[in-house]
Amino acid sequence: MTSQQKKTQQTARQLFKLSVVDGVVSAERVAGVLAYIEKTEPARSLALLKSYQRLIATELAKSEAIVEHAGPVADAALSAIGSSMSRRYGRTVTPHARRNDALLAGVRVRVGDDIYESSVAFQLATLSASV
């Protein structure tokens, strides 16, 4: 990695820190950062925007629980998953259902980079690997 790339990533991290208020991404702060970038047109602005976008997307993903399911999932189950993940992570985590017929039965929950799985497909794969 060149020194220019390191400097770009460091600037993106600084801008990201300015965008987070009390552990939550602030839409107003993000708008301000984007206006600043547009106004000042820094060197390597496209690379800076890509790095900044990746940091923001990663942070936003930490507040969403993507619940993949094969069959119908009750609203009460989604609420319970959201509550459980909120307690686990110490912040509000909003569940979003996504149908995935490859799971056969059960659920897979993704919060940021963490995956929690309780599906028949996962159990069969685990069993197959152990034999």
Image: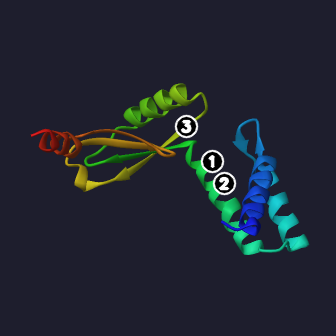
User: In the image, residue 23 lies at what x, y percent?
Assistant: 71, 37
SS under mark 3? loop
Whether tag 1 and tag 2 are in contact, CB under 8 A, the answer is yes
Compared to 87, does 17 lie above or below?
below
Q: Give amino acid for label 3.
A: Val
Q: Which mark is residue 83?
A: none
* Crowd around label 2: few <14 · some 14–19 · many ≥20 (10 Å): many
Residue indicated by mark 1: 59
- Which of the two residues, 106 or 57, is positioned nearer the viewer here? 57
Q: Is residue 125 visible?
A: yes
Q: Residue at x 55, y 30 (%)?
A: 89
Q: Give amino acid for label 2.
A: Ile
Residue indicated by mark 2: 56
Whether tag 3 and tag 2 are in contact, CB under 8 A, the answer is no
- Which of the two residues, 101 or 115, is positioned nearer the viewer here? 115
| Image quadrant where residue 2 sits | bottom right
Whether tag 1 and tag 3 are in contact, CB under 8 A, the answer is no
Residue indicated by mark 3: 93
Q: How many marks?
A: 3
Give the number of the mark in front: 1 or 3. Answer: 1
Compared to 78, does 9 lie above or below?
below
